[in-house]
Amino acid sequence: MQLESMYQEIILDHYKNPHGRGLRDPFDAEVHHVNPTCGDEVTLRVKLDGDTLADVSYEGMGCSISQASVSAMHDLVVGKPVTEALETGEHFMTLMQAKGDPSVAEKLEDELEDAVAFAGVSKYPARIKCALMSWMALKDASARALSVADSAGAPATHPTAPTTGGQS
């Protein structure tokens, strides 16, 4: 129970003191994701430096879980190559599929840092989407940014530029 209490404190701290919040320019891709189940929203921008996530900025509204998750994600991915950041996202997905199994959280603790605090969320299927929304937005925005970078010189109004995306 003491560990759960510590995890709750970490989530509340990220919610009350979000890291990386505020949309920043310049950016290579912007996406807007909505969780239709509860109304949580996030607009997320990525700026690449080659294949590295130089910056991830966002604005959002919603429950403490969705907003704390994007803050914890920001800390984990900025400065990492896109492939490594997306692999971290896969590990977070594994945590969300663990149904609260503490052994999974233990294995992922070093890599996920504060994000391991969301282990308890995996016990509540309705809340898993809240925790995953920002990670899905990162995956989407990264793919768009890499696509634009691959088409070197594509105009800002590229067909994949800011649109509304969402989870099902």
Image (cartoon, grey):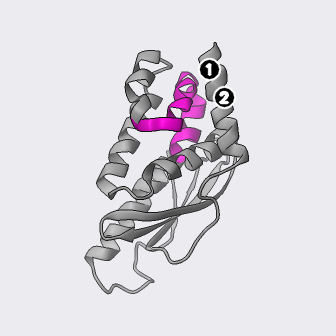
Residues at discs 1 and 2 in contact (Cβ within 8 Å): yes
| Image mark count | 2
Q: Secondary structure at mark 1?
A: helix
Q: Which mark is residue 8?
A: 2
The residue lying at 48 percent from left, 65 percent from top is 55
Q: Is residue 56 visible?
A: yes
Mark 1: amino acid: Glu
Q: Percent from the top left, x then y, of residue 104?
A: 40, 22
Residue found at the far right of this picture = 16
- Relative placement, left or right, of 39 versus 162 is right
Q: Separation of disc 1 and disc 2 at Cα? A: 6 Å
Q: Secondary structure at mark 2?
A: helix
Q: Is residue 86 magenta?
A: no
The residue lying at 59 percent from left, 40 percent from top is 130
Q: Main secondary structure of the magenta part?
A: helix
Residue closer to the observer: 55 or 32: 55
Q: Which mark is residue 4?
A: 1
Mark 2: amino acid: Gln
Q: Percent from the top left, x then y, of residue 134?
A: 52, 50
Figure quadrant of residue 123: top right
Label 2 neighbourhood size at 10 Å, few (<14), some (14-19), many (20+)? Answer: some
The N terminus is located in which quarter?
A: top right
Magenta-highlighted residues: 111-133
Residue closer to the observer: 75 or 42: 75
